[in-house]
Image (cartoon, rainbow, N blue to C red):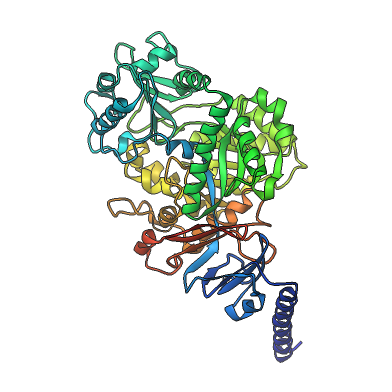
């Protein structure tokens, strides 16, 4: 065939494609007016066939048309709500790829320690809380991080404070303060007394109690050891009536949902919920009281999983508000608390390589349970050894079930990798569920923890994973970080630290990669790419509208971007005042 004939046929096919599109729009419009029409926008659809648009139409909770404003006007009827966004930027609703919904809500009900400049300030905050508390009432706080303080407490052990000052301001009220990572807590003497913890208490499996030179607990408990104190707190909660306990949990969920909606999050992948949590989510979804969509990982012990997993596989329940189809386990802790499991010792704590939190055998058994019951499997792994051990488990199970394909098992965080393990993500089809904001939040002290060589080779290596063909997701790990996607998107495209330096710039994402990592990639990581993650006819009308075009404005203007509207299922769930 000659080139001229090819061109003629190409032109003809293009014309037919465009005419087919117009015909489809016209037919769809004749089916009745839309319930919602958005016009005059700059819309990034994340649809490769039509990446940009000005307008879209929604009928019920489904997008029925995407195009120019003139294309969409025929969908406007007397009852149609028309949203003229006047040039603002619209995109698929942000999907939080890894967070903790109930913990986010509870953090709103506790002392906020995220901005405390030092330990002295935290003691002062607790002192004020004790003054307002009832005798014996638990004082709860969250968000402290010793690496972010402006001075090292004195006295201290491994950079952590001892408990004298906290005991002095709260001698009768038990105090439980959760580290920003969630992988350590600080408990005062009264809390330890109620928990029965003393110098004879042994370190539990997967945990460590920080001790002074005389082996006395100093107040800091890492990972598995946290349960020693939390058990005492849970016993106090057990005194609540069932109605009081549910009201407390509902308050936490509602606070978390409102926070998400105000920040443009339409779907939330919950990274460790109990059966009890899921029962509440299901109840709220049935009542149509869940304002966002939840995709949930179950975190329970293996015995409970084996007994209940069949009853808890839930897909698109309650107006597609709730899906439960993953199991979660924890291989290690966190870098900030020296509990990430490393292949080699920490540079700043050479006697330690971190912690293995849940045993390899336990995780292997859970993986087999997941694959037998058609569940995804998600393992928390931050350190390079934790990631290697997790990949080894996945490889073992995949070989045992060679007929099972496209499992989309995930590693949650995949934060520090040995170079030899990076290609294994793509080869095994394992998704790297990462958090860009951890890079810029932790960056100032990462090199101190693991040295320059390990930092450059394997710390937050988004591009290295992309280049081997792995899928990279994005999230915040809230309440470890703010659930707000805007600073997280900024972290992904800049890797800029607070001092203005850039943490290994060759690993930055392009804006297109960062947008996909927060939308369609997250949908793919939950087997939901057919219903969400892009704006195209037939998909759910989950839309976020921003004050600025984050794809085109100068980088340093991105953090100033505001959420104008959050739309879930065609309904406006948040509007900026």
Q: How far from the left and from the top, in percent, is residue 374?
A: 73, 39
Q: How far from the left and from the top, in percent, is residue 170?
A: 30, 21
User: Residue 301 appears in which quarter of the rendering?
Assistant: top right
Q: Is residue 304 left or right of residue 348?
A: right
Residue located at (38% from left, 52% from top): 504
Return the residue nearer the eye: 355 or 294: 294
Q: How far from the left and from the top, in percent, is residue 457?
A: 43, 46
Return the residue nearer the eye: 348 or 222: 222
- 22 w.r.t. 405: above or below: below
In this view, which residue lies farthest toward the front? 78
Q: Is residue 289 left or right of residue 440?
A: right
Residue located at (43% from left, 52% from top): 488
Residue located at (60% from left, 81% from top): 70
Viewer can see residue 527: no
In this view, which residue lies farthest toward the top? 200
Instruction: Count the numbered circles shown.
Output: 0
Quadrant holding the N terminus: bottom right
In this view, which residue lies farthest toward the bottom? 4
Quadrant holding the C terminus: bottom left
- 177 w.r.t. 413: above or below: above
- 164 w.r.t. 466: above or below: above
Viewer can see residue 273: yes
- 300 w.r.t. 535: above or below: above
């Amino acid at each position: 065939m000659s080139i001229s004939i090819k061109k003629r046929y190409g032109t003809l096919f293009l014309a037919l494609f465009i005419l087919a599109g117009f015909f489809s729009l016209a037919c769809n419009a004749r089916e009745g007016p839309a319930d919602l029409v958005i016009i005059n926008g700059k819309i990034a659809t994340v649809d490769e066939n039509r990446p940009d648009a000005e307008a879209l139409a929604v009928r019920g909770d489904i997008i029925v048309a995407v195009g120019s404003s003139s294309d969409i006007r025929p969908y406007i009827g007397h009852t149609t709500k028309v949203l003229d966004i006047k040039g603002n930027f619209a995109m698929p609703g942000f999907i939080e790829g890894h967070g903790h919904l109930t913990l986010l809500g509870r953090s709103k009900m506790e002392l906020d320690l995220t901005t405390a400049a030092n330990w002295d300030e935290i003691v002062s905050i607790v002192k004020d809380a004790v003054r307002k508390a009832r005798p014996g009432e638990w004082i709860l706080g969250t968000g402290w991080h010793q690496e972010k303080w402006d001075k090292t407490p004195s006295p201290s052990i491994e950079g952590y404070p001892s408990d004298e000052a906290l005991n002095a301001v709260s001698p009768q009220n038990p105090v439980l303060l959760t580290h920003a990572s969630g992988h350590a807590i600080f408990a005062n003497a009264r809390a330890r007394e109620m928990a029965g913890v003393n110098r004879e208490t042994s370190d539990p499996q997967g945990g460590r109690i920080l001790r002074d030179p005389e082996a006395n607990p100093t107040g800091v408990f890492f990972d598995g050891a946290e349960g020693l104190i939390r058990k005492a707190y849970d016993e106090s909660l057990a005194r609540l009536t069932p109605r009081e306990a549910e009201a407390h949990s509902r308050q936490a969920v509602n606070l978390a949902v409102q926070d998400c909606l105000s920040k443009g999050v339409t779907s939330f992948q919950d990274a460790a919920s109990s059966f009890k949590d899921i029962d509440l989510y299901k109840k709220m979804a049935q009542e149509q009281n869940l304002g966002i969509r939840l995709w949930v990982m179950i975190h329970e012990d293996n015995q409970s999983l084996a007994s209940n997993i069949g009853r808890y596989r839930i897909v698109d329940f309650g107006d597609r508000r709730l899906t439960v189809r993953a199991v979660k386990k924890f291989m290690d802790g966190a870098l900030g608390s020296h509990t990430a499991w490393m292949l080699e010792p920490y540079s700043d704590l050479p006697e330690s390589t971190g912690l293995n939190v849940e045993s390899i055998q336990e995780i292997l058994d859970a993986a087999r349970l997941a694959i037998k019951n058609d569940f995804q499997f998600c393992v928390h792994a931050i350190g390079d050894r934790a990631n290697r051990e997790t990949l080894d488990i996945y490889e073992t199970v995949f070989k045992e079930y060679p007929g099972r394909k496209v499992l989309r098992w995930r590693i949650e965080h995949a934060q520090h990798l040995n170079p030899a393990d990076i290609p294994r993500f793509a080869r095994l089809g394992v998704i790297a569920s990462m958090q860009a904001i951890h890079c810029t939040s932790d960056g100032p002290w990462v090199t101190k923890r693991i040295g320059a060589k390990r930092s450059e080779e394997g710390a937050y290596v988004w591009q290295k994973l992309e280049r081997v063909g792995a899928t990279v997701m994005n999230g915040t790990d809230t309440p470890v970080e703010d659930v707000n996607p805007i600073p997280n998107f900024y972290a992904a495209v800049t890797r800029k630290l607070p001092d203005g330096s850039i943490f290994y710039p060759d690993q930055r994402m392009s804006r297109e990669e960062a947008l996909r990592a927060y939308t369609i990639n997250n949908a793919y990581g939950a087997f939901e790419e057919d219903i969400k993650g892009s704006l195209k006819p037939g998909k759910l009308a989950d839309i976020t509208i921003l004050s600025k075009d984050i794809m085109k404005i100068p980088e340093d203007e991105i953090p100033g971007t505001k959420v104008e509207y959050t739309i879930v299922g065609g309904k406006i769930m948040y509007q900026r005042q």
